[in-house]
Amino acid sequence: MPSDQERILARAAREVVPGQIVNLGIGLPTLLFHYLPPEMEVLVHSENGVLGCQPLVAGSEPDLEMIDSGGAYIGTRPGASVFDSALSFAMIRRSRVDVTFMGAFEVDQQGNLANWKIPGKFFPGIGGAMELAQKVETLVVLCSHNDKHGNSKILRQCRLPLTAPHCVSRIITEKAVMQVTAAGLEVLDIAEGLDVAALREATEAELIIDEHRLGRF
């Protein structure tokens, strides 16, 4: 039985299309490239200035100057390029990045995203998430469905300060895959072993569910 994290990442890997430039946000999304088929032709972008990231080869010594946006050591694939942050953000602002995966403290049924600040707690700043959320055409949120207290993170309306409004395309949790539409959150897939009633109970947001078309993951 896969863990919640493994379920999210394995399902998220199915969102990646060969030939894309893919940005992986800090936290859970940075683990996604471990789930991409090694033969898949994609370029992983890190906003600190790397295009062509890949996991370190097991047992290899890391290059101490090669890190991802979360500060973890990375390797690079043949043909990778390294550049300054100004050029990296120019790529984002010109919409050269096809899809970005981000974590979230909260996300709501209008596609609003809150992932940078919890009032009263230390935060380093909004960082590149604001730029990515506004300029990348497809934003996929990867997060747990509920917080450690059992409260839904999938809301009718975000309560925390927004990273950006109306920017989320799709949400993947360990319980469901939800598409943001003009009518609300449409559930595309539901986790194996979970029924619709339990999903609705775990979710504050209103869900659009056609049980005859639901996939499983």
Image: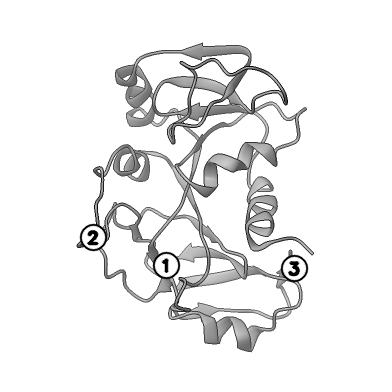
User: Which mark lies nearer to you, 2 or 3?
Assistant: 2
Tell me the residue that label 1 is attached to.
Answer: 182
Quarter residue 58 falls in: top right
Q: How dense is the environment of label 3, judged by Cα within 10 Å: few (below 14), some, or many (20 and up)? A: some
**Left or right: 169, with 122 as reference point:** right
Q: Residue at x 37, y 76 (%)?
A: 156
Element under label 2?
A: loop
Q: Residue at x 62, y 86 (%)?
A: 198
Looking at numbered disc 1 in the image, what kind of residue is underneath it? Ala
**Left or right: 159, with 61 as reference point:** left
Q: Nearer the viewer, residue 7 or 18?
A: 7
Q: Nearer the viewer, residue 186 or 35?
A: 35
User: Which mark lies nearer to you, 1 or 2?
Assistant: 2
Tell me the residue that label 3 is attached to.
Answer: 216
> How is the model colour-coded?
one colour
Mark 2 or mark 3, which has the lower sequence index? 2
Element under label 1?
A: loop
Q: Estimate the x, y position of residue 192 in percent, counting from the top left.
A: 75, 72
Q: CA distance from mark 1 to mark 3?
A: 24 Å
Tell me the residue that label 2 is attached to.
Answer: 161
Q: Estimate the x, y position of residue 3 in percent, counting from the top left.
A: 69, 61
Q: How dense is the environment of label 1, judged by Cα within 10 Å: few (below 14), some, or many (20 and up)? A: few
Q: CA distance from mark 2 to mark 3?
A: 33 Å
**Proximity of marks 1 and 3: CB atoms separated by less than 8 Å:** no
Looking at numbered disc 2 in the image, what kind of residue is underneath it? Pro
